[in-house]
Image (cartoon, helix red, strand yellow):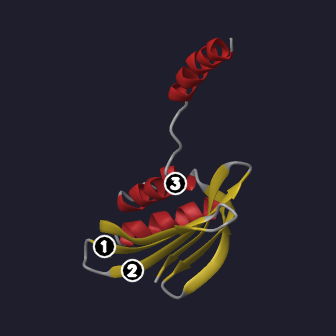
Amino acid sequence: MKKLLFALLMSTVIPALAQQEPKVDIIEEVSTHIKEASIKELSQYFDVTVELTIQERENAYSKAQAEIILKNFFMKYPPKSFKVIHRGASEKGGKYLIGLLTAENGTSFRTSIIIIEKNEQYYVQQIRFE
């Protein structure tokens, strides 16, 4: 009887697990949007406010303001490549990445991005191009 119940349980659990959507790798998503200068797609992950540092200019901006500032940045420095050098996670579920953005004109920016998790959603909280 126990074997029959176990077999019945497994026949319903395994297919249900197989149908679950895979979790999005937020680091890969953000990296791709940076590499492609896809600001609209990137801004979907912005928190209510985003801390931006572009070269030596640093401030906290609303989602809409951050989108405009990044659009202008990528117009001035269109990406040639973006390489993730290091990635990690905190104990509280936050994630970060450190990368190197190389613009078409040869200018390189050390890039760091901090992503937090709230209510099972990821939000970009900070972006730095230095």
Mark before the other along the chain sequence, 3 or 1: 3
Q: Residue at x 33, y 80 (%)?
A: 108
Q: Residue at x 51, y 46 (%)?
A: 24
Which structural element holds mark 3?
Answer: helix
The answer to the question of whether label 3 and label 1 lie on touching residues, with beta carbons closer than 8 A, is no
Dot 2 surroundings within 10 Å: few (below 14), some, or many (20 or more)? Answer: some
Which structural element holds mark 1?
Answer: strand
Query: Residue beneath label 1, please?
Result: 103
Could you tell me the amino acid type at mark 1? Ala
Q: Which mark is residue 16?
A: none
Q: In the rendered image, which quarter is residue 20 located in?
A: top right
Query: Residue beneath label 2, please?
Result: 109
Q: In the rendered image, which quarter is residue 9 located in?
A: top right
Kindly report which numbered mark, 2 or 3, lies closer to the viewer in this rendering.
Answer: 3
Left or right relative to 12: residue 86: left
Kindly report which numbered mark, 3 or 1, lies closer to the viewer in this rendering.
Answer: 3
Estimate the x, y position of residue 99 in percent, counting from the top left. Answer: 41, 73
Could you tell me the amino acid type at mark 3? Ile
Front one among 114 and 2: 2
Residue 53 to residue 48: above or below: below
Residue 130 to residue 33: above or below: below
Mark before the other along the chain sequence, 1 or 2: 1
Q: Which mark is residue 26?
A: 3
Separation of disc 1 and disc 2 at Cα? 8 Å
Which quadrant does the N terminus fall into? top right
Separation of disc 2 and disc 3 at Cα? 21 Å
Could you tell me the amino acid type at mark 2? Phe
Estimate the x, y position of residue 90 in percent, counting from the top left. Answer: 63, 68
Name of the residue lying farthest toward the bottom: 56
Q: Residue at x 46, y 84 (%)?
A: 130
